[in-house]
Image: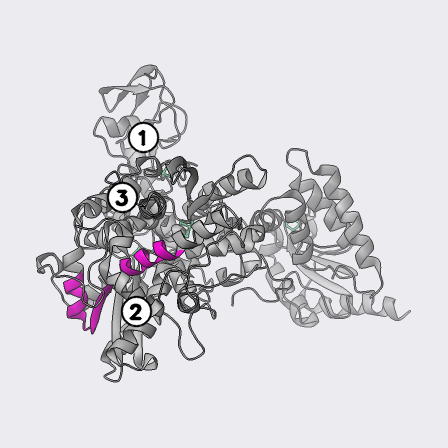
């Protein structure tokens, strides 16, 4: 156990471990100190001074970085402290573009909440208001510096956790801005569209490109057959948008809501996750048996793919050639399903609901689709779906539960766990072990690849060989793992990489929880728990046992890795420049 | 690129820059001294130079650009042969330096930090240069002009243009 010290906060004696902060200690004593820039383990830089307290020192101190010490006396609620916090907040508000009524973060905005908590009635300062241009050129991310409070959480996320460093604090003084170099658009820099910056932003300065109108338009268009597919992580998070606790499952209600929105069919992306396992498993076995390029690295996460294209072109050949489940499913819908239902694929409109902002970039990659149509027409995030449900006046919490539509139906537990880090690996192992050992293993839970540890490794005996696997989530971890492989310090057969920390459950398109929640609850772990409960609840938990998917092969794709499968279900990648050679005018 | 002379010096500059990067590569806090020397070589720090620095020091371009824009001594734009600095310190400001600044930009058809097409003039704002008694003040390279009014500006510009013609 850590060494403890005793301090007094507002007259209450508190014991706290050495090395913890006054903020931690106050929390344990039930005393709330307001914060803005602080985000546990991500941004602990003491920049905003919202959290000041009186420690008896000459000036007030930032509680989020002030260490506890024996005998320390802290006052968190004196007139001077309250006034200092108010002044700090009013200064921030004085040049903030205060347009709450039309702001996507209204009601889920930490700045708005602070203004309420601190009882701000009037703003005593006349700040010069900014007039920065809004960067909306990226298909995924919209950056509005006029609402930025310069907390730097996004900078830390992008640089320290994701290892991308596409954004930084630029300029100084009044001109200070968080942006990309030379004020380039996020569309022109090595941003991978992961959206992790959005999920940590306390305000509306970063948001996803809203594509809901395109979906409404398609639904309203009587000429179109509009189908929707939903990724596994959406069902364990969307309920948060309707006031439910983190980790609530809402699969059946979500399906009902989608039907009520007017989609002609509601399908589960998981069907394609099962397909991915068949295709990727076949690819893996093929490469092991024929001396192909190893390790095979998963290709489900479009943020990871773009990161690889920018930073590790030498690994492009390792990537599985499988399209991501989203695009695989789009392709299945516009080929097999269109054929079966006798619908012209050009008259079909496929919407995907994803936990991911990078999927918006992915759907417009020219290689994903045919000349006449793209696999998926529009990709929206969990947050956008929640907005549509609200806009339509649907009472989500009181909906009945229904099932996904045939001919695809419900998928397997193996597909559901794609939503958490280690899930693709585990799903693949479930199938590959059965194939190699030619049996139906009862032991199917590979716990070594589960959990929030940054890099996980496993060695599994099957078919008389040891299959070596590694899993990384969060691109900073991916970088570490790839550097190890590159240096020859580690060898694997199969590697799973997800761009987002925790995998898709914590994707950049998921419901945003404020710091007050994030500092207490590990979103990655709680949402993953719901994923594994869903897995256990399903009657079939191995991809190759999904009968409806196997029928796809019988009726259309022949067998995994067939010529036809390659035509529709596989793709290729391109190396990308990191920055343009020339930039004349920035983003506007 | 770095110079307007159209000769092979670009490559020579690139070579010099990689020598500089090599020299500092493994030292703590290499970025600022490297940027200083890069600016000496090129006269300013365009995208291509910042990219080379970022690559050479294995840090992000965003970090390099953040530092370049934080410190006023670094410049993103080429400087003119005659570099005009307008003091916007308090003393000069209250005596109308803002108007002088606007007049200069209008007379040369420039934005802050830019350089005229013929490469002769650049205009930028600066902080107090310690000549408050002469406020408002501008500097053209090392020449100081004080107690200015807006009407003096055309004459000063002409003075340097004439110098060129000679
Ligand atoms: S960011 Fe917050 S405070 Fe600012 S306009 Fe949006 S809701 Fe209002
Ligand atoms: S989307 Fe991801 S890569 Fe792009 S700026 Fe945000 S955190 Fe960085
Ligand atoms: S964009 Fe958001 S997260 Fe980034 S510094 Fe501004 S307010 Fe903070
Ligand atoms: S300084 Fe403590 S929350 Fe920002
Ligand atoms: S304020 Fe201009 S010289 Fe001091």
A259 to A95, vertically: above or below: below
Subunit that carries the residue with mark 2 = A
Query: Could you tell me which secondary element the residue under label 3 belongs to?
Result: helix
Quadrant placement of the N terminus of chain B: bottom right
Query: Could you tell me which secondary element the residue under label 1 belongs to?
Result: helix
Q: Is mark 3 within 8 Å of ligand 2?
A: no
Subunit that carries the residue with mark 3 = A
Within 10 Å of disc 2 (Cα), the crowding (few <14, some 14-19, many 20+) is many
State the residue position of label 1: A23
Q: Where is residue A112? Give x, y as percent.
A: 28, 51
A405 to A468, vertically: above or below: below
Specify the segment rendered in magenta.
A255-279
**Mark 1 vs 3, N-terminal side:** 1
State the residue position of label 3: A528
State the residue position of label 2: A351
Query: Could you tell me which secondary element the residue under label 2 belongs to?
Result: strand
Mark 1 or mark 3, which is nearer to you? 3
Q: Is mark 2 within 8 Å of ligand 2?
A: no
Specify whether B39 is left or right of A199.
Answer: right
Are discs 1 and 2 located on one and the same chain?
Answer: yes
User: Residue A264 colored magenta?
Assistant: yes
| Tags 1 and 2 touching, CB below 8 Å | no
Q: Where is residue A575? Give x, y as percent.
A: 57, 59
- Which sits in the foreground, A29 or A315? A315
Q: Where is residue A507? Give x, y as percent.
A: 34, 51
**Mark 1 vs 2, N-terminal side:** 1
Q: Main secondary structure of the magenta part?
A: helix
């Amino acid at each position: 156990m850590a060494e403890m010290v005793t301090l007094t906060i507002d007259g209450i004696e508190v014991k706290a471990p050495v090395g913890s902060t006054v903020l931690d200690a106050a929390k344990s004593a039930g005393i709330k100190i307001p914060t803005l820039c602080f985000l546990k383990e991500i941004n602990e830089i003491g920049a905003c001074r919202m959290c000041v307290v009186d420690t008896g020192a000459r000036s007030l101190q930032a509680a989020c970085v002030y260490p506890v010490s024996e005998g320390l006396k802290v006052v968190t609620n004196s007139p001077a402290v309250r006034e200092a916090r108010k002044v700090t907040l009013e200064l921030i508000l004085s040049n903030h573009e205060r347009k709450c009524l039309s702001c996507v973060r209204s009601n889920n905005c930490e700045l708005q909440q602070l203004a309420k908590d601190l009882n701000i009635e009037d703003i005593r300062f006349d700040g010069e208001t900014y007039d920065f241009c809004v960067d909306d050129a990226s298909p995924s991310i919209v950056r509005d510096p006029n609402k930025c409070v310069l907390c730097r959480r996004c900078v830390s996320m992008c640089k320290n956790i994701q290892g991308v460093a596409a954004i930084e604090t630029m300029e100084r003084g009044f001109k200070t801005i968080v942006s990309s170099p030379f004020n380039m658009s996020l569309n022109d820099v090595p941003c991978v569209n992961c959206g992790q910056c959005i999920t940590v932003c306390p305000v509306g300065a970063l948001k996803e490109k809203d594509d809901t109108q395109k979906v409404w338009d398609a639904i309203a268009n009587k000429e179109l057959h509009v189908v929707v597919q939903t990724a596994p992580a959406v069902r364990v998070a969307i309920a948060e948008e309707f006031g439910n606790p983190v980790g609530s499952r809402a699969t059946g209600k979500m399906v009902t809501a989608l039907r009520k929105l007017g989609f002609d069919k509601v399908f589960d992306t998981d069907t394609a996750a099962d397909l991915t396992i068949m295709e990727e498993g076949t690819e893996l076995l093929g490469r092991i048996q024929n001396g192909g390029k190893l390790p095979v690295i998963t290709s489900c996460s479009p943020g990871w793919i773009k990161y690889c294209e920018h930073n590790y072109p030498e690994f492009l050949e390792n990537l599985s050639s499988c399209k991501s489940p989203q695009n695989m499913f789009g392709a299945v819908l516009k080929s097999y399903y269109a054929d079966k239902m006798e619908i012209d694929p050009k008259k079909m409109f496929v919407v995907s609901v994803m936990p991911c902002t990078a999927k918006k970039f992915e759907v417009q990659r020219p290689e994903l689709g045919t000349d006449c149509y793209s696999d998926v027409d529009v990709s929206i995030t969990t947050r956008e779906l929640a907005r549509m449900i609200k806009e339509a006046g649907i009472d989500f919490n009181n909906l009945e539960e229904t099932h996904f539509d045939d001919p695809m139906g419900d998928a397997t537990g193996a597909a559901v766990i794609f939503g958490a880090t280690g899930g693709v690996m585990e799903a693949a192992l479930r199938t590959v072990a059965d194939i190699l050992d030619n049996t139906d293993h009862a032991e199917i839970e590979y716990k070594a690849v589960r959990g929030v540890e940054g890099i996980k490794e496993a060695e599994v005996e099957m078919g008389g060989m040891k299959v070596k696997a590694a899993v990384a989530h969060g691109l900073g971890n991916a970088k570490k793992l790839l550097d190890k492989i590159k240096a020859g310090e580690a060898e694997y057969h199969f590697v799973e990489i997800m761009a987002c920390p925790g995998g898709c459950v914590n994707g950049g398109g998921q419901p945003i929880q404020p710091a007050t929640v994030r500092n207490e609850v590990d979103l990655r772990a709680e949402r993953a728990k719901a994923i594994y409960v869903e897995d256990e609840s399903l009657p079939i938990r191995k991809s190759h046992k999904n009968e409806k998917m196997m029928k796809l092969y019988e009726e259309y794709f022949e067998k995994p890795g067939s010529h036809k499968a390659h035509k529709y279900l596989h793709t290729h990648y391109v190396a990308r420049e990191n920055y343009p050679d020339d930039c004349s005018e920035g983003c506007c | 690129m770095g110079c307007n002379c159209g000769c092979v010096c670009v490559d020579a500059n690139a070579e010099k820059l990689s020598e500089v990067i090599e020299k500092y590569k493994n030292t703590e806090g290499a970025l600022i001294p490297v940027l200083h020397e890069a600016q000496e070589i090129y006269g300013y720090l365009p995208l291509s130079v910042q990219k080379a620095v970022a690559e050479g020091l294995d840090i992000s371009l965003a970090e390099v650009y953040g530092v370049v824009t934080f410190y006023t001594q670094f410049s993103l734009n080429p400087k003119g042969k005659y570099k005009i600095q307008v003091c916007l310190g308090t003393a000069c400001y209250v005596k109308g330096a803002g108007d002088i600044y606007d007049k200069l930009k209008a007379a040369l058809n420039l934005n802050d930090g830019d350089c005229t097409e013929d490469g002769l003039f650049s205009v930028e704002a600066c902080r107090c240069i310690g000549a408050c008694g002469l406020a408002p003040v501008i500097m053209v390279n090392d020449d100081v002009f004080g107690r200015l009014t807006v009407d003096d500006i055309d004459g000063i510009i002409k003075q340097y243009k004439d110098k060129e013609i000679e």
